[in-house]
């Protein structure tokens, strides 16, 4: 009576897939879990090609990873979408070569785990994140986070475009983009106060120097990120108010000019007719200057 292999049950009762194949890729052994998944008997699978390419897009990727089995460390991890009785399943294989003592590969053993649901969940999360980012980036606000040392962590793509901020620019601190405008010092004080207190500060304005030296005004609304009663980061949003600042400056200048002209003495008790004539003369002059385009 043959002695029973003490490891046979350990291999054949595994829920994970276990296979053994030669360097040519022909299967030498498959456990019952593999047979059950593909819906074929063990004798049908023995001698067949292991890991046939299910999609031409993945052929080169799988082949590249499997070349690691023939050089140190003689191991690799690769994912394969494999046809099964339940449809396509994503199997994560961990393979290791068995050497012949002369440095050559004798056989290869691999264990596979079904990670289909994990990959589907990952795709769903990525799609949700992409949809959320689309909504976030479509609004007026542009979002960012930075450390307590002002090192940029997350920067909205629109902020990168606005400031000309791109990887490799050498600028890691968001303060590197500030101009020398005196109002910026007050804004930095607001940030420092929020870090110290752990409470939101009122909105404030900053002037940045963007690409090509353009001056950009933004309104900042930020909040400290607090964990265990300690501020660990700053998160906030920016709104580009450059055009608004130009309009406000123009209105302020116009108001100064208006006040200057209103202080000039007018003729004594001008009649409504004479005042009307004054404005009419101005409009008539504008007509003459502008011609037919008026």
Image (cartoon, helix red, strand yellow):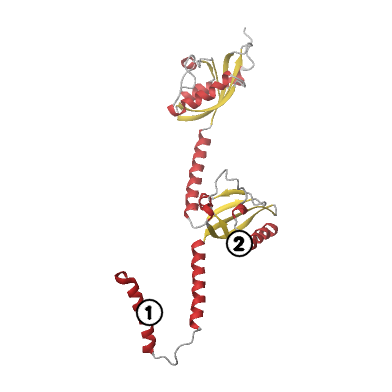
CA distance separating discs 1 and 2:
40 Å
* Picture coordinates of residue 131, whole percent (x, y): 47, 48
Residue closest to the eye, 168 or 131 = 168
Residue carrying label 1: 282
Q: Mark 1 or mark 2: name the one nearer the start of the chain.
A: 2
Q: For the residue carrying disc 2, how many other residues have a C-alpha within 10 Å: few (<14), some (14-19), or many (20+)?
A: few
Q: Is residue 37 left or right of residue 4?
A: left
Query: Helix or strand or loop: what does disc 1 sit on?
Result: helix
Residue carrying label 2: 181
Instruction: Name above or below for residue 279 compared with residue 52.
Output: below
* Picture coordinates of residue 248, whole percent (x, y): 51, 69
In percent of the image, x 50 and y 76: which residue is there?
Answer: 257
Q: For the residue carrying disc 1, how many other residues have a C-alpha within 10 Å: few (<14), some (14-19), or many (20+)?
A: few
**Residue 195 got which mark?**
none
Q: Nearer the viewer, mark 1 or mark 2?
A: 1
* Picture coordinates of residue 154, whole percent (x, y): 58, 48
* Picture coordinates of residue 289, whole percent (x, y): 35, 73
Q: Is residue 4 left or right of residue 32?
A: right
- Specify the quadrant of the image occupied by residue 55: top left
In percent of the image, x 51 and y 46: which residue is there?
Answer: 129
Viewport quadrant of the C terminus: bottom left
Residue at the extreme left: 292
Q: Is residue 284 visible in the rendered structure shown here?
A: yes
Q: Are marks 1 and 2 in contact (CB under 8 Å)?
A: no
Residue closest to the eye, 98 or 213 = 213
Instruction: Name above or below for residue 211 compared with residue 271.
Output: above
Viewport quadrant of the N terminus: top right
- Specify the quadrant of the image occupied by residue 285: bottom left
Residue closest to the eye, 30 or 128 = 128
Residue at the extreme bottom: 269
Query: Helix or strand or loop: what does disc 2 sit on?
Result: loop
């Amino acid at each position: 009576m043959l002695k029973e292999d003490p490891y046979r049950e350990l291999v054949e009762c595994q829920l994970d897939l276990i296979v053994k194949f030669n360097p040519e890729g022909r299967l030498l052994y498959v456990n019952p879990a593999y047979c059950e998944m593909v819906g074929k008997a063990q004798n049908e699978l023995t001698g067949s090609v292991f890991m046939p390419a299910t999609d031409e897009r993945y052929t080169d990727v799988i082949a590249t990873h499997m070349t690691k089995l023939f050089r140190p460390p003689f191991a690799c991890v690769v994912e394969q979408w494999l046809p099964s009785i339940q449809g396509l399943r994503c199997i994560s294989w961990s393979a290791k070569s068995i050497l012949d003592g002369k440095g050559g590969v004798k056989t290869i053993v691999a264990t596979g785990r079904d990670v289909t649901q994990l990959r589907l969940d990952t795709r769903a999360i990525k799609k949700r994140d992409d949809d959320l980012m689309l909504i976030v980036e479509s609004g007026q606000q542009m979002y960012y986070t930075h450390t307590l040392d002002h090192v940029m962590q997350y920067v909205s793509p629109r902020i990168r475009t606005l400031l000309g901020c791109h990887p490799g620019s050498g600028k890691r601190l968001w303060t590197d983009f500030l101009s020398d405008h005196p109002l910026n010092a007050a804004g930095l004080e607001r940030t420092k106060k929020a870090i110290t207190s752990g409470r939101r500060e009122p909105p404030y304005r900053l002037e940045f120097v963007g690409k090509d030296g353009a001056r950009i005004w933004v309104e900042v609304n930020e909040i400290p990120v607090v964990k265990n009663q300690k501020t660990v980061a700053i998160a906030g949003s920016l709104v580009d108010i450059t055009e608004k600042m130009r309009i406000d400056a123009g209105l302020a200048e116009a108001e100064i000019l208006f006040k200057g002209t209103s202080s000039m003495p007018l003729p004594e008790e001008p009649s409504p007719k004479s005042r009307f004539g004054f404005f009419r003369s101005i409009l008539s002059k504008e007509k003459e200057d502008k011609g037919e385009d008026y």
